[in-house]
Image (spheres, helix red, strand yellow):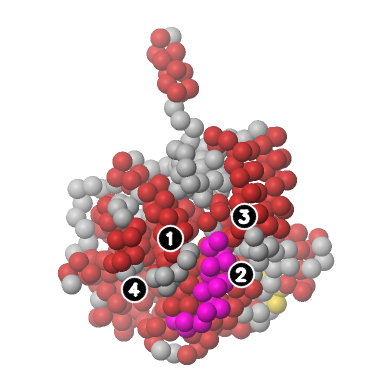
Amino acid sequence: MRSLLAWLFLAGALPAQVQELSRQQRDSLQELRPKLAIAQRGSDVAAVRAVVAESLRVLGDQAGLPEVKDTYRQPSSSAPLFKSDRIAEAFGPYADHVEKVRWWKIGLDPSKLNHALRETATVARACLAAARAEPKLAARLLPIARE
Amino acid sequence: MLWAQSEAGTGVIPFPAVRSGSGRSFEVSERFLARLERSGQLPSVVRNGWVSADPAEECGLQFDNGLGGCALLELHAATQDRRYLDGALKAADWAAASPLVTNWNYNAFSLQLLSQAYASTRDERHLAAARRKFLFGVQPGQLVDGPRAGRWADAHNARPAYHYIMVRALASFLAVMPKDDADRPGVLGCLRLALRARNPEFASKGIMNIDSSVEALVAVERLPAAARAALGPCGVAEALDVLERHVAHGVTKGKSSAGPEACALLLERAVGRRR
C-alpha cells in the first residue's frame, strides 16, 4: 500500500509527456486554424503572430508537448566513432541493400506504387554523400543516384 | 524523379495516387484523395497516376517536392547535368507558388528547397520566397519562452522528427542569407533556440530520433564558421557524436540503426575529421 501511494505521488509529480487537451481546447484550436491560414496568406506577420498567441493561450501548459510520447534509445556511449579509412566497408551493406530494392523505374505504374519519391531522394543523397566520402564508391553509387 | 515530375506536368515532384497504400504518408494521402473524390475534384488532380496538384491547399505535396528538389540540386552539383537543375528549379517554382499552410513542417520543406535553389541560382525570387516561408510559415509556430522554449507549440511539430526537419530548413536558409540581411538575427535566434531545446537530450536522455536529426545537425555543422560563431554553443557536435557512435556501433554489429542518407553523412563527417 505504501509503495502504491508513493508511486501515485511520484506519477502525479512527473511532468506531462504528451499533449492532452480537453474537448473545448481542441474545438478552440480547430476554430483558430482557418484564421491562421488566412493570416498566413496576407502580408502582415503580426496578424499571424496574433493568431498563434491566441492558440498558445488555448494550449496553456500543454504547448510544446508532442502528440506521442518521446521514446529514447540508450546511446552506445563507449562505441567508437566511424573510422575514415573504413568508409567502403561501413557503407557496403547499405549499397547492397539499395541495389537490391531498386523499385524506381521509368514507366512504373504509380497507382500500384507503395513508395513515395522521398525515398528515391534520400537514396540519391545517400549515394552522393558516400561517393564524396569514399571516391572508390563513386563508380558503383553514382549510377544509382542518377536513376 | 524527373520522369515522374514530367508525368505529373505541373512542376511538382509528385506523390503516387495509390489508394489504400500502407504507411503514414499513404494514410495521409488516402484521406486527401478521398476528400477530393467526394468533392468531384479527383480527376483534375491525378495525372498519369500521380497527384499533381492540391486544390484543397493542404500542401502535403511540399514534403516529397522539397526533398526531391534538394536531391536534384545535389545531383546537378555532382554531375553538372543541366536536366537536374531544370527539374529542381521547376520544383522550387512550384514550392514558391504553393500557399503557406498551418502545418509548419510542410512549409519547412519548401523553405529548404528554396534556400538551396537560391544557393545554386542567386535568383532573388528564390530568396524572397524562402523569406516568406520562414517569416509566415515556420518561425511563428516556435515557442520563444517557457520550459519548452525552442520547440514548436503544436503537438505534431513538437515531435523530434519534425523538430529536426525545421532545424534542417533553418540551417539551409541561414547558409545562404546575405550577412547584412535584416532577417538574419531572427533566423539565428530561431535556429539557436531550436538547437538548445532538443540537443542536450541526446546526452542526458538518449536518442529520440536518428535520421532527421543527423541530416539537420550535419547541415548545422557545415554552416560557415561565422554563422556557427554567431549561433554560439548549441551542443551540435556533442549530439552528433552520440548519434555517430550509435550508428557506427550498429554498422559494426550488422544491425543498421540509421537510413542510408544519415549513415553516409556521418561517414562524410568521419572523413572531414581526417582533413
Distance Cα–Cα, label 1 vs label 3: 18 Å
Q: Quadrant of the C terminus of chain B?
A: bottom left
Task: Specify the quadrant of the image occupied by residue A130.
Answer: bottom left
Chain letter for the residue marked with disc 2 in the picture: B
Secondary structure at numbered mark 2: strand
Q: Earlier in the sequence, mark 1 or mark 2?
A: 2
Q: Kindly identify the amino acid type of the residue bearing the numbered disc 2.
A: Phe
How many numbered marks appear?
Answer: 4
Which type of secondary structure does the marked residue at label 4 adopt?
helix
Q: Is residue B145 above or below residue B189?
A: above
* Disc 4 residue type (three-letter): Ala
Category of crowding for the residue at label 3, using alpha-carbon neighbours closer than 10 angstroms: few (below 14), some (14–19), many (at least 20): few
Dot 4 and dot 1 within a common chain: no
Label 2: how many Cα within 10 Å (few below 14, some 14–19, many 20+): many
Pinpoint residue A16: horizontal percent, then vertical percent: 49, 32
- The residue that disc 4 covers is A129
Q: Which residues are magenta?
A: B120-135
Label 3 lies in what chain? A
Q: Which residue is mark 2?
A: B15
Q: Which mark is residue B185?
A: 1
Residue appearing at x 64%, y 70% in the figure: B98
What amino acid type should be assigned to the residue bearing mark 1?
Pro
- The answer to whether residue B3 is left or right of residue B236 is right
> Mark 3 — residue?
A46
Rounded to the nearest angstrom, the CA distance separating label 3 from label 4 is 41 Å
Callout 1: helix, strand or loop?
Answer: helix
From mark 4 to mark 1, how far is it between C-alphas?
Answer: 31 Å
| Residue at 46%, 74% in the rendered image | B116
| Nearest to N terminus: mark 3 or mark 4 | 3
Q: Are marks 3 and 4 on the same chain?
A: yes
